[in-house]
Amino acid sequence: MNSFQRFLVFLILLAVAVSGLYFWKAVSGVPVRQMQEPVLTGLTGGGGQKEQSVLRQLDQDFQALVQRVRPSVVSITAESTHAAVHGARGVASRIPPNLGSGVIVSSDGFIVTNAHVIQGAGKIFAALHDGATYAAEVLGQDPLTDIAILKIEAESLQSSPFGDSDQVRPGQIVFAVGNPYGLQETVTQGIISGIGRRSTSETVNEFFQTDTAINPGNSGGPLLDVAGRIIGINNAIHTKDGGWQGIGFSIPSNTAKKVYEDIKNYGRIVRAFFGVVWSRNLTPQLAKKLGLPDEHGVLIQYAVEDSPASKAGIQAGDVIVAFNGRKILDGIDLRNRVAGLKVGQSIPVTVVRNGKTIDLEVRLSEMPVPR
């Protein structure tokens, strides 16, 4: 059931409830008085106590939100430099441009989008809310998170702020704004259906699942909370026919924010390094043998020499059960947690060694560059 259908169901139930109340009063002999609209007080700010109906207030709040965030969303056109060969005569023609979305995150023209939107592009253009189109420069991209950072030469642009994706919970109301099928500034609304969804690819981040309508062309656009903050970057859909079927995925904003800050501040991705190699995933039988309450955790095969993990005292045979105050499910979970942290952070780590729980602290270093 989509958002509009849910809204209609709500109106029908409200009408039934009101009708039932009138009928009860008529049958019981209670005089039927004019019913007041349900009210919500003090939502509009400005120090006033303005009272309006709940539905009207929600409608106005949603409209205000959309009007505020739409100017920060851009349509991305990425033109390939390669040529495609078609027909018996081998006539060369340009590959159709890739269409996507992006969101302005600073007033001086920094844009966040998906790396796959601009993959293989020779020319990239960003169309703004007012119709102005700018050539966009790729400042950096990170295939491991599927985030890319673009820059256009413009000033005093409307931007949207990042929210804290660690605070997102299932059931939360969200909005998506983007460019599906080339339909610029399309707005859809839904909820967060799930968190911590994993990709089958090698991406180092987990995803939010949402029932907000997302279609081809939405990739790279923002998923926003009711305050207009970016809590995700729309990335993919689960589909059998290429269109939306109620399951979309969004990259958490904290992941996108880190890529943006790294590229803006350092010109490259700076990843934290922990330095462990883990063994196979735990089974219930192995967990019992190791004195663990369940099969959650990471069995360490060895700590890399002179790594933050080895310096912190982590040893082969240790089972990491908590990292940075959060329970660890398995090795992929541990990898994703490290990827979201900053170089130099000191992180509490809990391990089980020979059946005993030990609390350690590790100071993360920068990921070594492969040689």
Image: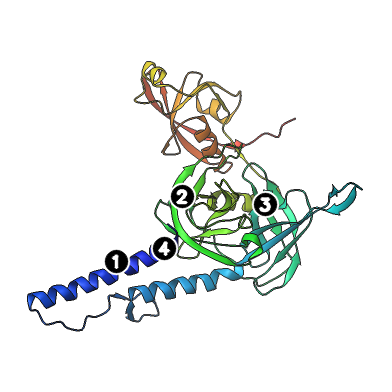
Q: Give the farthest residue toward the left.
A: 29
| Marks 1/2: CA–CA distance | 34 Å
Give the amino acid at mark 1: Leu
Instruction: Give the vertical position of 177 relative to 354 (above or below).
Output: below
Q: Residue at x 53, y 41 (%)?
A: 345
For label 1, the residue is 13
What is the secondary structure assignment of the residue under circle 2? Answer: helix
Q: Residues within 10 Å of mark 1 (few under 14, many from 20)?
A: few
Give the amino acid at mark 2: Asp
Give the amino acid at mark 4: Gln
What is the quadrant of residue 352 in the picture?
top left
Q: Residues within 10 Å of mark 3 (few under 14, many from 20)?
A: many
What is the quadrant of residue 278 in the picture?
top right
| Marks 2/3: CA–CA distance | 21 Å
Q: Residue at x 85, y 48 (%)?
A: 86
In percent of width and height, residue 317 lies at: 48, 18
Q: Which mark is residue 148?
A: 3
Q: Is 191 or 106 nearer to us in this picture?
A: 191
Q: Residue at x 54, y 62 (%)?
A: 161
Give the amino acid at mark 3: Ala
For label 2, the residue is 166
* Front of the two marks 2 and 4: 4
| Marks 4/1: CA–CA distance | 12 Å
What is the secondary structure assignment of the residue under circle 4? Answer: helix
What is the secondary structure assignment of the residue under circle 1? Answer: helix
* Front of the two marks 1 and 2: 1
Q: Earlier in the sequence, mark 2 or mark 3?
A: 3
In percent of width and height, residue 71 lies at: 60, 71
For label 4, the residue is 5
| Marks 3/1: CA–CA distance | 45 Å
70 with respect to 96 (left or right)? left
